[in-house]
Image (cartoon, rainbow, N blue to C red):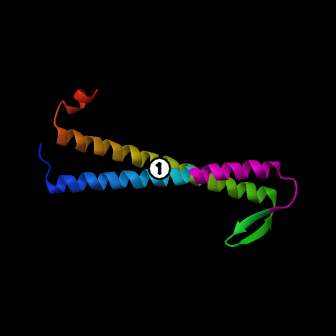
Amino acid sequence: MELNEQQIAEIQNLQRQLQMTVMQKQQFQMQLEEMKAANEELAKSKGAVFRAAGSLLIESTKEEAAKDLKEKMETLDMRVSITSKQEEKLKARFEEMRQKIEGPGAGAKKK
């Protein structure tokens, strides 16, 4: 099947969206891992605790810092979940477009 310009543009757009979503999810996952590591270190700490507030470090209680980290981890976990769902939807749309272009039975040949 010959592709028209609209189909090519749609496939390219889907690819870009998928790449951006995957990169965004990876960033959220990395931030979440950093927060988990910080939470582990916070649990081990015995002395003063400081939190970043812009370019400043401000003394805080361990409880306040733990609460703040927990909230940030929950937010990041939700973002990872949302971007995972977006990724799955984009993959499904991309696969649907690929099958339309390749025609029926094309997927069976590859397996």
Q: Give yes or no for residue 44 being in the magenta stretch.
A: yes
In depth, the one of 86 and 94 nearer the eye is 94
Give the prevailing secondary structure in the magenta stretch: helix
Work out which quarter of the rendered image holds the N terminus and state it. top left
Q: Residue at x 17, y 56 (%)?
A: 6
Q: Give yes or no for residue 45 being in the magenta stretch.
A: yes
In the rendered image, the residue lying farthest to the right is 47
Residue 50 position (above or below residue 109): below
Q: Residue at x 51, y 50 (%)?
A: 26
Q: Amino acid at mark 1?
A: Ile
Viewed as shown, does residue 63 lie left or right of 29? right
| Residue identifier under label 1 | 82
Q: Position of residue 21 (x, y in %)?
A: 42, 53
Q: Residue at x 88, y 57 (%)?
A: 47
Q: Position of residue 94 (x, y in %)?
A: 29, 45
Question: Crowding near pointer 1: few (<14 within 10 Å), some, many (20+)?
Answer: some
* Magenta stretch, residue numbers: 30-49
